[in-house]
Image (spheres, helix red, strand yellow):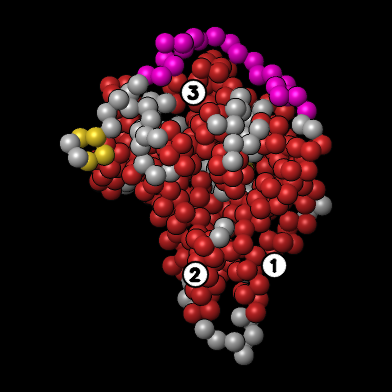
Amino acid sequence: MSPRYRFDRMEIAGSLGDLGTLLPIAIGMILINGLNPMGMFISIGIFFIFSGVYYGITVPVQPMKVIGAYAIATAMTPSQILASAALMGLFLLIIGGTNAITLIGRYTPKPVIRGVQLSTGTLLMAQGVKFMIGSSKFQMVRHMAEPYLTLQHVGPIAVGIIIGIIGGVLTLLLLENRKFPAGLVIILGGITLGLVFGTHEGLDKLKIGIYFPQLLPFGLPAKADFTFAFFALVLPQLPMTIGNAVVANADLSQEYFGKDSKKVTYRALTISMALANLLSFALGGMPLCHGAGGLAAHYRFGARTAGSNLIIGSLFLVLGVFFGVHALSLVYLMPMAVLGVLLIFAGSQLAMTVIDMKTRKDLFVALLILGITLASNLAAGFIVGLAVAYALKSERLTV
């Protein structure tokens, strides 16, 4: 068995590997939707640490992307978002507590799992490119490619593209380097750029203290908030959560960690996400989940033990507890293009799991899910892919 905890440079680098997914949605939901940064960072930190201690291996923590993206795009109220967190928590608790999720996972064919992983990885890579060229929703809202840098262009070339190219080359050179881990070098380099060329927004108001989160900072959501959240946020999110955060995540965990991942079951993942969402609801944070993309990111940049969870979880707790609502000013130091580099390499790691598809039918299912995901969303891809995978078990059908 591998050591349960390690706290070396590789674990530190790996712990930062998924910030490209986590930070943009977190920042967007704080700035646009008005969520509580203190409650958000504390709930993320607790979820990371709890997951590492319980599962004993690297376990990802991610935002629920369907909810996050739609909430940011439509500027939903905090009450509507928190209602979705409560409903997701209750639903996951039911299917986890009754063990219905194990049946769902057992009857999900491997080509469907690979299709979800391929689609998620491709989406992460595309989002990474958008961060570099300044076309993500968050950057479009701010009308700047690098909202927190004073330098926007070097000659005719956007600074994000230059940062992305340099970051990409450095990552390729250092990806297997244990002395100078790629993830750590890229993150530290990004922070240095932020300190030198950043707008330093909010740094003058930064005050270290001890801050405690408020319980239900926005009050209880109204009945109308729950009804709206159920149809607009929860129903579109559920298939993606089951497909990516439970089934695909458990499969990838087994592939990476073998017997060490014995606690990473469909039921355990579902219940831990349920508890995390109920915690986020109570503290005014965002809906949270596990996810195959996050696991691929942490693993690709060096995380191999639960130590990475304790490292990144403690970082988020420090931000929330010691800096409170002003913690966001420290997050602003990270250029968007640096997060884009992390996303591209994390996404490629996840997408390449499809290489073990050996038959035309299996590969067709995975590619079909990708196509539907790009044209619609991952939830639709998962449902259609599941139906087609079972249909193709018939010898009468060929591709």
Q: CA distance from mark 2 to mark 3?
A: 39 Å
Q: CA distance from mark 1 to mark 2?
A: 20 Å
Q: CA distance from mark 1 to mark 3?
A: 43 Å
Residue 318 locus on image (x, y percent): 53, 20
Numbered tag placed on residue 107 in the rendering: 1
Magenta extent: 200-220
The residue wearing badge 3 is 328
Residue contact at pointers 1 and 3, CB within 8 angstroms: no
Which one is closest to the eye, mark 1 or mark 3? 3
Numbered tag placed on residue 367 in the rendering: 2
Residue 209 is inside the magenta segment: yes
| SS category of the residue bearing label 1 | loop
Residue type at mark 1 is Tyr
| SS category of the residue bearing label 2 | helix
Q: Against 130, is 350 above or below?
A: below
Quadrant in the picture for residue 388: bottom right
Residue 234 locus on image (x, y percent): 70, 47
Q: Residue at x 66, y 53 (%)?
A: 236
Residue 54 locus on image (x, y percent): 64, 38
Q: Nearer the viewer, residue 264 or 198?
A: 198
Image check: 362 left or right of 274? left
Q: Against 387, is 373 above or below?
A: above
